[in-house]
Image: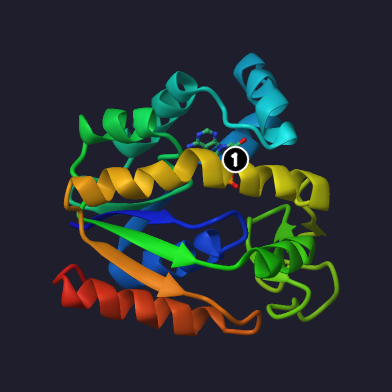
């Protein structure tokens, strides 16, 4: 039962890799970003307060985020591990997580800014099943229609250049200290560099799995 967190700037492919690792490692993936987007869609009052932050590319307050994470961790079947995608984003969140789960390893994706901007502006997501596409390198067979379920594809409202820049800034300032946090705690790292726009997701996934195998975690 492996417990992992995956770090990388917005657009580093975290969601794509995590959804593939899910099958390979038989774990659940918890993406706080996806959960927040679902909450916003439902239009509840909590969803409305979350919307204000997400649409500006700002972090949702720690306590709200941790409560949402806890609720979702509790839903994981006994004996099954997890990958956290998008959590923790602050040291407060990491400390709160430490109190309820011991993280086995950190997956760290290293991606230059120019790749992030290019990738995010061409990212499309299925409104129906959440599958992720990229109009440059992970194209759907039919424009704007999901290969898997036939649902319509959309562009996230925070994938615009202005909000992307803000999200990179937020990531650098508030999330980099987390790498130091986990290093200080001697949590093992699997570091994978992505230096080409066209590297297929499978290649990165295999590199991550090789790193996990070395640690006896896959
Ligand atoms: P993501 O899909 O991970 O890029 O997240 C999209 C947005 O959701 C972020 O820009 C934040 O506004 C919010 N969000 C997701 N995860 C967290 C978190 N752990 N803490 C605070 N805000 C978050």
Q: How is the image coloured?
A: rainbow
The location of residue 59, given as percent across then percent down, is 58, 31
Taking 31 as reference, is 165 left or right? right
Taking 161 as reference, is 73 left or right? left
The location of residue 197, given as percent across then percent down, is 65, 79
- Residue in the picture at 73% in, 62% down: 117
Q: Quadrant of the N terminus?
A: bottom left
Whether label 1 lies within 8 Å of ligand 1 gets the answer: yes
Crowding around mark 1 (Cα neighbors within 10 Å: few <14, some 14 to 19, many 20+) is some
The location of residue 131, given as percent across then percent down, is 63, 62
In terms of image quadrants, where is residue 11?
bottom right
In the depicted structure, whether residue 63 falls above or below residue 190: above
Along the line of sight, the residue nearer the viewer: 154 or 14: 14
Q: Quadrant of the C terminus?
A: bottom left
In terms of image quadrants, where is residue 158?
top right
Taking 155 as reference, is 183 left or right? left
Along the line of sight, the residue nearer the viewer: 121 or 84: 121
- Residue in the picture at 76% in, 78% down: 136
Query: Ligand 1 lies in which image quarter?
Result: top right
- Residue in the picture at 31% in, 52% down: 82
Residue 158 visible in the picture: no
- Residue in the picture at 16% in, 70% down: 215
In terms of image quadrants, where is residue 155?
bottom right
Residue 87 visible in the picture: yes
Along the line of sight, the residue nearer the viewer: 128 or 181: 181
The location of residue 135, given as percent across then percent down, is 78, 74
In the depicted structure, whether residue 169 falls above or below residue 214: above
In the depicted structure, whether residue 76 falls above or below residue 8: above
Label 1 sits on residue = 170
């Amino acid at each position: 039962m492996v417990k992992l967190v995956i770090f990388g700037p917005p657009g580093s492919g975290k969601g794509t890799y995590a959804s593939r690792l899910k099958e390979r490692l038989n774990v659940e993936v918890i993406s706080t970003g996806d959960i927040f987007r679902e909450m916003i869609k439902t239009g509840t009052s909590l969803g409305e307060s979350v919307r204000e932050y997400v649409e500006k590319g700002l972090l949702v307050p720690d306590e709200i985020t941790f409560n949402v994470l806890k609720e979702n961790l509790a839903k994981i079947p006994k004996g099954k591990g997890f990958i956290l995608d998008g959590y923790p984003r602050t040291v407060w969140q990491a400390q709160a997580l430490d109190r309820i789960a011991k993280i086995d390893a950190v997956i760290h994706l290293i991606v230059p800014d120019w790749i992030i901007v290019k990738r995010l502006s061409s990212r499309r997501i299925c409104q129906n099943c959440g599958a992720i596409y990229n109009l440059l390198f992970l194209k759907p067979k039919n424009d704007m229609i999901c290969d898997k379920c036939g649902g319509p594809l959309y562009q996230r409202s925070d994938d615009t250049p202005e909000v992307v820049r803000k999200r990179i800034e937020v990531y650098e300032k508030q999330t980099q200290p987390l790498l130091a946090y986990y290093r200080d705690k001697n949590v093992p790292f699997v570091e994978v560099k992505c230096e080409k726009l066209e590297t297929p997701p499978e290649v990165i996934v295999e590199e991550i799995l090789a790193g996990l195998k070395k640690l006896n975690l896959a």
